[in-house]
Image (spheres, grey):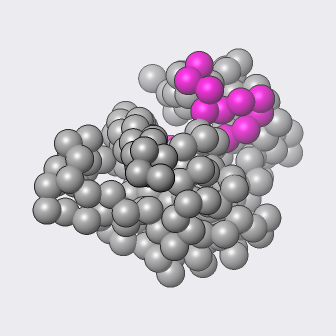
Amino acid sequence: MTPGEALAAECARYAAMGWMRGTSGNLSVVVARDPLRLAVTVSGRDKGELTADDVVVVDAEGRTDDPLKVPSAEAGLHGRIAAVSGAGAVVHVHALAPVVAAEYWPEGVELRDLEMLKGFGRSAHDDLVVVPVVPNDQDMRVLGDAFEAGYREDVPALIVARHGVYVWGEDLYRARHRLECLEWLLRFKIETRRDQR
C-alpha cells in the first residue's frame, strides 16, 4: 500500500467516526529520515473522500516543492513531532473528548488505573500518565516549541486546547490504536468527573 493509499484509508476511518468533520484534521507518514520527509494529507479536502493522490511530500518544516498541492497548515508540527519523537506516523483529529478534557484540565490530563492504558502503551495500574495540553496558536513554530517543552518519550500524544489532539506511533496502525484508546480514556475521565459533581 502506498503512503497515499494508507493515509486516505485512515482518513476515511476517522471521518466515519466523526473525528475529521468537514475538511478538518490531517495525517502524515514519514517517507525518509535523512533528510526528514513526510507524506501529509493536502489542505482543504473532505477527509472522508480523499484519494491516494491527495497527499503531498513535505520537509521537516512542512514546506513542499510541489507547485500544485497545498499541504495542511499544520504539516510543520507533524514534522517537528516526527523529528523529536522518532515516530513513523502522526495523526491529528478533532475528536471532541480531548478538547473537552483540555477545558477541565488545562495543565495536563492525568490518567491512571485504567485497563485501556495498555492500548496507549502504558501500564494499567500504578502508572500515572499526564497528557500534555498546550494553548492553540496559528504559528506552527510556537506550537512546536510548546510540544517540545513538554515532550515525554512515554506519552505519545499532545492536546491542543480548543483545537484537537495529535497522537503518534511507529506507523499509522499503532498511531490509530493509541488514538482510539486515548479517546476512550478521555471520555471516561470526563464522564466520571460529571458523576462526582
Q: Residue at x 61, y 59 (%)?
A: 103
Tally of numbered discs: 0
Q: Residue at x 44, y 57 (%)?
A: 157
Residue 11 on image: x %, y %: 59, 28
Name the foreground residue: 149 vs 57: 149
Extreme residue in the front direction = 197
Residue 72 on image: x %, y %: 74, 47
Residue 18 on image: x %, y %: 62, 26
Could you tell me if residue 83 is visible in this image? Answer: no
Name the foreground residue: 82 vs 121: 121
Residues in magenta? 16-33
Name the foreground residue: 45 vs 52: 45
Q: Quadrant of residue 161?
A: bottom right
Q: Quadrant of residue 17?
A: top right
Q: Is residue 197 magenta?
A: no
Could you tell me if residue 67 is visible in this image? Answer: yes
Where 128 sits versus 122, above or below? Answer: below
Name the foreground residue: 102 vs 146: 102
29 left or right, relative to 134: left
Where 126 sits versus 68, above or below? Answer: below
Extreme residue in the right direction = 68
Where 58 sits versus 27, above or below? Answer: below
Q: Residue at x 52, y 65 (%)?
A: 105
Residue 36 on image: x %, y %: 52, 61
Q: Residue at x 41, y 51 (%)?
A: 196
Where 73 sits versus 3, above or below? Answer: below
Q: Is residue 18 magenta?
A: yes
- The quadrant of the rendering that contains the N terminus is top left
